[in-house]
Amino acid sequence: MSEIIIKKAKKLQGAPKMPGDKSISHRAAILSLLCAERVTIENYSPAADCKSTLNAVKQLGAGVKEENGKVVISPPLGGGIIEPESPIDCGNSGTTMRLLAGLLAGADINATLTGDESLSKRPMKRIIEPLKLMNAEIAGSEEGTAPLSIQPATLVPIDYTMPVASAQVKSAILLAGASARTKVTVREKIIARDHTERMLQSLGADLQVDTVKPEVVDDPDDPRKKIRKLPTEKYKAAITLDVGGKLSGGEIIVPGDFSTAAFFIGAALMIRGSHLILKDVGVNNTRTGFLTVLKQMGAEIELKNRRDIGNEPVADIEVVHSKLKPRKISGDIIPKLIDEIPILALIAASLDGTTVIRDAEELRVKECDRIHAIAENLMRMGVKVGEFPDGLAIEGHGELEGAEIDTFGDHRIAMAFGAAGLAAHGGVKISDAEVVDISCPGYFSLLEGLRA
Ligand code: S3P
């Protein structure tokens, strides 16, 4: 275990390069198993989670090599996915396990998916249930956790309304449909990240997204006025996928990881005089709820040089330290900033006043119970904090005290509190600094390189 001490910084300046997006990298590697031709992936994430996915893809028969810094994945010889000889280890990665479970459920093979201690505790019923409705032969432990065992089955079409907002569940169903070539419709009450849909479309799949928009109608109380009426449908988007054959291959360029950029944005906002530019970062609006909330709190953040790379929006993010005001964060925006809540909590803790975060019960079933981990470590940093089943109340008093952090083995807890160390009197000490490798190897050097 490697220990790191992060001391208070005067200010931060620079333009650190963000690694490739983790979510998009997973999808690029997994979808290449369904392609007729090879897929070349530029800027593939160096995250340990994405290495787990590459190893899995190899075990399923694909050729994986590096060429000029790009990852090149060739389809399995003979075209079909090959039955793995041993269990596939998904490591710490929920995305690897849930997306692969969907794809393998429709692949007509036997396979077992395992994970580390944290992943083995995370809920898998959320994918087992819809996949079983498709006739899949998939089973987990009695508690509905990994290991997952999958057997050959003939899948049937499904029209499924999601009970939780989860891109992993949505993607598992879409991938089951794509590998079994069975029509699927997934309805979302709250829209989760849509990278799978975008990538399927760019690889030539017949995928349609119907979004339900609010109606503009006469105001019953004042006929001179119009009001926006919420739709009667119980969902906001319906995604229909009907894959008839192989997807095309080609080149995928992975944008910089917004969720990693968030820690740098947070650090700049916490430290007076800071100014950072984060270039070529993915700014898909199903991911950028963090920016929406920060702007509402008064942050000076600008998106420059906006463009599309492949089928994903990208921009350079410029952030200047700003005086922020606390506000309540809840409702439909939560899935759009779920991975950014640890750093958002620290920004909140460094302000004067109370920030309340609700509707974020999903945080309890991430790599650790993030609500508890945030509360425990904020208290260590001298902040008053209350836990709700679905969130936190953080009473900031304008200052963070130095502390020894318990990461609970979770990369995002280590990254958020590491960034906060730069703003805390007395800094922070983290004894298992290597946990950041799960999403961003080299994170602490990148942070240290920004001291001005
Ligand atoms: C992810 C989806 C989210 C997110 C996770 C990555 C993905 O999880 O928290 O870090 O790549 O699809 P859920 O689908 O469980 O919300």
Image (cartoon, grey):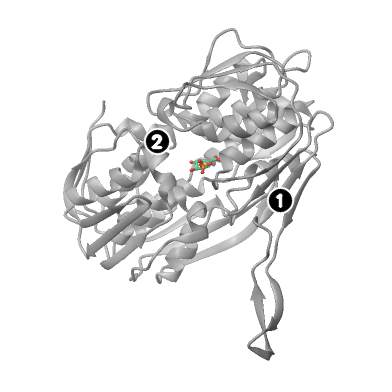
Q: Which residue is mark 1?
A: 238
Question: What distance separates the C-alpha of mark 1 from that of mark 2?
Answer: 29 Å
Q: Is mark 2 within 8 Å of ligand 1?
A: no
Task: Judge by depth and name the residue closer to the eye, 85 or 220.
Answer: 220
Closer to us: 267 or 389: 389
Horizontal and vertical percent for residue 202?
75, 42
Element under disc 1: strand
Q: Amino acid at mark 1?
A: Ala
The yes-or-no answer for disc 1 within 8 Å of ligand 1 is no
Q: Residue at x 48, y 55 (%)?
A: 334
Residue 268, label in figure: none
> Looking at the image, which residue is at 21% across and 54% down?
424
Of circles 1 and 2, which is in front?
A: 1
Left or right, residue 57 beside residue 262? right
On screen, residue 224 above or below 269: below
Q: Residue furthest right?
A: 244
The quarter of the picture where the N terminus appears is top left
Residue 29, quarter of picture: top right
The image position of residue 225, as x and y in percent, is 67, 88
Q: Position of residue 34 (x, y in %)?
A: 73, 27
* Closer-to-camera residue (359/395): 359
What residue is at 71 percent from the left and 36 percent from the top? 251
> Residue beneath label 2, please?
367
Point out the residue furthest to the top here. 85
What is the secondary structure assignment of the residue under circle 2? loop
